[in-house]
Image (cartoon, rainbow, N blue to C red):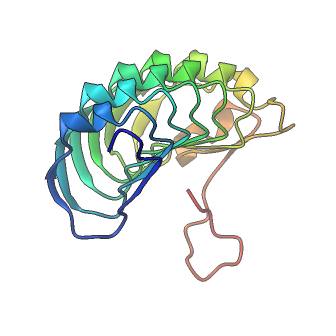
Amino acid sequence: LTQLFNLHLRVNALEGPLPSELGQLSNLQFMNLGGNPGLNGTLPTELGQLTKLKWLGLWDSSYGGTIPTVLGKLTELDGLSLRSNQLSGTVPTELGQLRKAFFVSLFGNTALEGTVPSELGRLTLLDKLCLYDTALVGTIAPSICTTNKMTASVFVEAELLNSCDCCVEPNLDPLSPNATVC
């Protein structure tokens, strides 16, 4: 399996913790295990060994604990979706090392707290940053709003709307053609 390129098992009723052996899939570029609410436990630090990974989708599951700082080693990552889990603690400053990321979604982790790290302003390709439905506070680094994409969209709670020029409240109406997709 070390030659595996794509692991796409979203919405498959998977259960249990992620095995640390996933870190041995050294050629993996796409991992989407989202939509499996039976997946739980903490995110293994061995995910940081997947240095060729371009997309990591672990959304709508039941992972708990903190976001591993080793995710900052995934410098080839274009997209990171950890939305709607049970992650807690602070957003690691190391996520600012994901220089190729254009999409980062952490929304729906209601126990994520603290401030939004200014290091996320280093993500110069960022197009969408989803931070609503969390307990994050403070201001958003102005550099997040002026990326190479001209203007990024940062979706936040109403309390953070005035914290940056590109902060917008998400449109959560599923019937709206302008509904926010994070």
Position of residue 162 measured from the top left corner of the image (x, y, whole percent)? 67, 36
Position of 26 relative to 133 (above/below): above
- From the viewer's perspective, tell me whether residue 64 is left or right of residue 155: left
Q: Residue at x 22, y 70 (%)?
A: 13
- From the viewer's perspective, tell me whether residue 39 is left or right of residue 178: left
Closer-to-camera residue (142/101): 101
- From the viewer's perspective, tell me whether residue 36 is left or right of residue 56: left
Q: Residue at x 71, y 71 (%)?
A: 178
Position of residue 182 measured from the top left corner of the image (x, y, whole percent)? 55, 56
Position of residue 108 measured from the top left corner of the image (x, y, whole percent)? 39, 51
Closer-to-camera residue (99/178): 99
Farthest residue, direction bottom: 175
Q: Residue at x 56, y 39 (%)?
A: 54
How many labels sit on residues?
Answer: 0
* Quarter occupied by residue 1: top left
Position of residue 95 measured from the top left corner of the image (x, y, whole percent)? 50, 24
Q: Residue at x 41, y 42 (%)?
A: 3
Position of 123 relative to 79 (above/below): above
